[in-house]
Image (cartoon, helix red, strand yellow):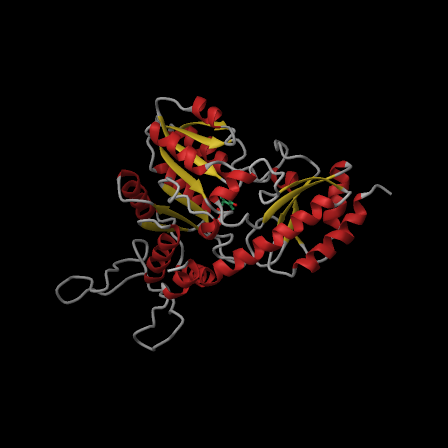
């Protein structure tokens, strides 16, 4: 089945009690035993399993082509639980421009716990290769990256990881399984902040892991999920399943609009540079074309004349919302360096854009009028 069909058909469980077409939300924390002491529906207690969470985990596994999915209370909870699956003494390699929460977890929580890590340039395979140590157990990919939309070659990096006896994980938040399926390219695990495109409406905080196969890492991480209990709540799972039904259509429409915006910005005289992997001039274009169905709905732009000009553009948008995050139906714009704080390496004149579901012409018109303010008076 195609993903859009799968997303709807897979969720089509008509409720046995009322015949309800939309699934009920199961809020109960505890489940009844039969007279013989067994649990006829398989659920015992809500931290261990719940019908809404099971349905979500199955849907995510199917979309990513994995063996099982695990749903968490945030993307960070998913990353944290995966790292707990490693052991003190292990070494991790992450991209030098990974989502800032990933190195923050490694530095503040896992370094004292016994993990070491190296940040490498993931557009350069020799740099990753040179960062591999004897105790490297995990290589963490994130592509496209944030906020410079760098493209990492998933298949080549997964092969490097396996040669080194390490697992390969891909943070697939930005691409979604509709545009990119890392498990098919050799990764062992996919991580998602489902807060973003999977939810799709900026109203659920949640995360997930999908595993390619059963094994040591899956078993350990699943134990930590159940014991640690950073699980997604039933209502959040229900919202995410609702989001999945429209995911294919949303991400395709948003990606198509993003390409139009990138092309418009690329021609604009007030713009210094556009970062979007769908532009042929982007250094990752060839790899993106190989591993992605479309180029996604995130782009970054550097405005000529520095930080003040960039701030002026962000300050004059009318349709875009000035906010961080991504993946919702409403287009967002943000001055990225302000969000990342004083240690950021992000250029001060960079604006990051999350393209929503508005009409491309309206978004372009809004940027056009806001860009008039880029010029110093
Ligand atoms: C948002 C995000 C995360 C963190 O997820 P939360 O749901 O905010 O905890 C991780 N990776 C990427 C790429 C993200 O965009």
Where on the picture, by quarter, is residue 341?
Answer: top right
Q: Nearer the viewer, residue 278 or 83?
A: 278
What is the number of callouts on the image? 0
Q: Residue at x 42, y 37 (%)?
A: 155
For residue 300, side relative to residue 173 (left or right): right
Give residue 366's position: percent from left, percent from top.
Answer: 73, 56
- Whether residue 2 is visible: yes
Residue 252 x %, y %: 53, 56
**Residue farthest bottom in this picture:** 18
Between 17 and 167, the one lying in front of the other is 167
Picture quarter with the C terminus: top right
Where's residue 125, x and y in %? 47, 28
Can residue 323 be seen at all in this image of the molecule? Answer: no
Find the residue positioned furthest to the left: 36
Which residue is pictured at 32% across the width and 62% down the height?
51
Q: Tell me the quarter of the picture where residue 329 sits.
A: bottom right
Q: Is residue 125 left or right of residue 12?
A: right
Query: Does 346 sit left or right of 6 as displayed?
Result: right
Q: Residue at x 77, y 45 (%)?
A: 312
Out of 44 and 212, give the one closest to the viewer. Answer: 212
Quadrant location, the N terminus: bottom left
**x%, y% of residue 97?**
54, 34
* Residue 357 sits above or below residue 231 on the image: below
């Amino acid at each position: 089945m195609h993903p859009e069909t799968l997303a709807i058909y897979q969720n089509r469980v008509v409720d046995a009690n009322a015949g309800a077409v939309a699934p009920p939300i199961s809020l109960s924390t505890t489940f009844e035993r039969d007279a013989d002491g067994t649990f006829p529906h398989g659920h015992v207690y809500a931290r261990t399993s719940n019908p809404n969470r099971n349905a979500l985990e199955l849907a995510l596994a199917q979309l990513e082509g994995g063996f099982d999915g695990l749903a968490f209370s945030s993307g960070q909870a998913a990353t944290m639980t995966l790292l707990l699956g490693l052991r003190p003494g292990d070494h991790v390699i992450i991209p030098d421009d990974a989502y800032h929460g990933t190195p923050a977890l490694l530095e503040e929580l896992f370094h004292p716990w016994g993990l070491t890590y190296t940040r490498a340039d993931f557009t350069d395979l020799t740099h990753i290769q040179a960062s591999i140590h004897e105790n490297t157990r995990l290589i963490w990919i994130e592509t496209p990256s944030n906020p410079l939309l760098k493209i990492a070659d998933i298949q080549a990096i997964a092969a490097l990881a396996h040669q080194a006896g390490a697992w390969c994980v891909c943070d697939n938040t930005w691409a979604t399984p509709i545009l990119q399926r890392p498990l098919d390219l050799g990764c062992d695990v996919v991580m998602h902040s489902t807060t973003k495109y999977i939810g799709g409406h900026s109203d659920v905080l949640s995360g997930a892991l999908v595993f390619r196969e059963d094994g040591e890492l899956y078993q350990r991480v699943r134990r930590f999920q159940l014991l640690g209990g950073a699980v997604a709540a039933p209502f959040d799972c229900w919202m995410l399943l609702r989001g999945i039904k429209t995911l294919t259509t949303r991400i395709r429409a948003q990606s198509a609009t993003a390409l139009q915006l990138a092309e418009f910005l690329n021609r604009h005289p007030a713009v210094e540079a556009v970062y979007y992997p769908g532009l042929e001039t982007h250094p990752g274009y060839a790899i993106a074309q190989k591993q992605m169905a479309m180029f996604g709905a995130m782009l970054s732009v550097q405005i000529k004349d520095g930080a003040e000009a960039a701030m002026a553009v962000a300050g004059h948008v009318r349709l875009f919302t000035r906010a961080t995050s991504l993946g919702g139906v409403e287009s967002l714009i943000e001055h990225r360096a302000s969000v990342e704080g004083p240690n950021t390496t992000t250029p001060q004149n960079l604006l990051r854009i999350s393209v929503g579901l508005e009409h491309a012409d309206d978004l372009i018109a809004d940027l056009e009028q806001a860009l008039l303010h880029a010029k110093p008076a």
